Image (cartoon, helix red, strand yellow):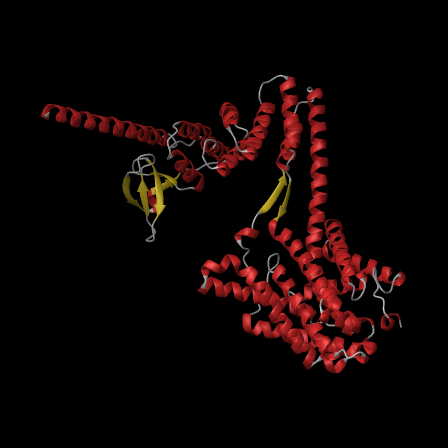
Amino acid sequence: MKIIKKAILLLSTLTCLVLTGATLGAASELYDVTQELNTKSYSKKAKVVAKIAETGDEQAADILRALMAGDLFARKSDKIIVLAEKQPDGGYALIAPGTGAALGTAKKSDLSKVKINNRVRNAIKAALGGLDLNHPDPAKRLAAADAVFKSLDDDMLPLLEARLKTEENDKVKSAFEQTIAALYLNADVDFAAKVSALHTLKESGGPEVKSFLSRYLAELPEEEAELRSQVAEILDAVERRLSNFALVENLFQGLSLGSVLLLAAIGLAITFGVMGVINMAHGEMVMIGAYTTYVIQEICRTSFPAGLEYSLIVAIPAAFVVAGFFGVLLEKSVIRFLYGRPLETLLATWGVSLILQQFVRTIFGPTNKEVSAPSWLSGAWEVTSGLSLTYNRIAIIIFALCVLFALMLVLKKTLFGLQMRAVTQNRQMARSMGVESATVDSLTFGLGSGIAGMAGVALSQIDNVSPNLGQAYIIDSFMVVVFGGVGNLWGTLVGAGSLGIVNKFLEPYSGAVLAKILVLVAIILFIQKRPRGLFALKGRSVEG
């Protein structure tokens, strides 16, 4: 039994020695290859980069990333290539690449950085791409395919083709096919294979494909007329597709801008429609809603970090209440005494807007405040290659429509809505029927201001929060109300959507400022023909 135990112990020891030797051997191989970077020739360095990747060592990617980041040095005393990590005292801790052995410390003057150029950088990107092609994370494999597509390293073609056969993720598989097609165009293959590759690229059709085909066509010799014709045809098809996608994205951007204008203008539409008040402080209600969002997020960040992801949901009702409170306060303290005097109301509310701006500056300072987006609103929905829609703007469009239809339910299905419509259509008759028009005015003003506050919550996701935030939208909001029809919610919806889309389509050609001027001129001309807007309210007081 003792002999058997000794034999087992001896066998275990030998196994450990063999495994350790194999590990050290692999590490030693990586270390030896890395030392070859100690050369002035950039072409040799690019070849060494490929050799480092070919070792297959887990630390190869770390060494290549360190080389890209400028953290690989040659020690001047013995010309050994080392990884250097900067220390708090200003010195550098030296580590042997591949083995991880500590080599002491050194001053910056004792080290010489391993220099690289664009050729070596491209080689590193391609090598890292090859190492990541087999990574278990699909995002890593996708990034690796993109890196190879940009570098067009022919050596990666066999690896990509082999990896494509086992790839299960559709998005990654599409990226592999696109990269393989680009490599085929640069490879020595027959005409039919290149045409097939072109059609594969046509199906991908993203901006990177357009850029690649443009370069490829420019570099293609004039003698290859037939291939040039095929490339030009595919390039035209890709450009048309991207042009259509740009049209869709412009439409989407216009709808998102229109949604913000809708939220800002809804409150203005009902207050202007019910009371005939030109409220120049309406933009400040938007600003108050945005600052309410900022305050709630700061409270969550300092006291309830776990609730930071949901702070935006809490901010919606909070902004409605805070902005609504300021609206009621404004109506009771200023506007109530100026009914029937629109010019004085305009001047008074403009003064109130300046007071509110200074009030906010005093509390929060004049600098912009950033409201971070929760993870569930970050990123974009990639519909297809070349077309992506951001989640925050999609959410704003949905939110604006929900607010609009909720307000319609309030107006159509509640007693308050009935009284508001009665006052809008004929104030004197509503009073004679026992409706407290003063109370309706106050609550209506609070409702309109509260909705503007919710617009501030939406705006905080696409713009910086500042004391001047509301001023950027007040004129546009008035244009929406006048264009759509004073007091008409459907008109406000159509007006906001139209102005948002037209603005976005004009901006690339005329610039943002000139686009607004052109829209303003168009609305002035339109009002000359239809003074009551697209959808005029009907009622005796309105018609009279």
Q: Quadrant of residue 419?
A: bottom right
Q: Position of residue 33 (x, y in %)?
A: 36, 29
Question: Left or right of 198: which side holds 39?
Answer: left
Q: Does 328 appear above or below 5?
A: below
As drawn, the residue found furthest toward the bottom would be 337
160 relative to 331, above or below? above
**Residue 175: x %, y % from top left:** 57, 32
Vertical arrangement, residue 502 with respect to residue 6, above or below: below
Q: Residue furthest left?
A: 2
The reply, left or right, for residue 543 in relation to residue 291 is right
Q: Is residue 370 visible?
A: no
Residue 522: percent from left, percent from top: 83, 58
Residue drawn at (46%, 58%) of the image: 306
In this rendering, does residue 408 appear at all? yes
- Between residues 136 and 307, which one lies in front from this camera angle? 307
Q: Is residue 192 left or right of residue 501?
A: left
The image quadrant of residue 451 is bottom right
Which of 404/337 is in front?
404
Q: Residue at (85%, 65%) from the top-left corner?
A: 532
Looking at this rendering, what residue extends furthest in the top direction?
190
How many tags in the picture?
Answer: 0
Query: Could you tell me residue 443's position as x and y percent?
Result: 69, 74
| Quarter occupied by the N terminus | top left
Q: Which quarter of the rendering shows the C terminus?
A: bottom right
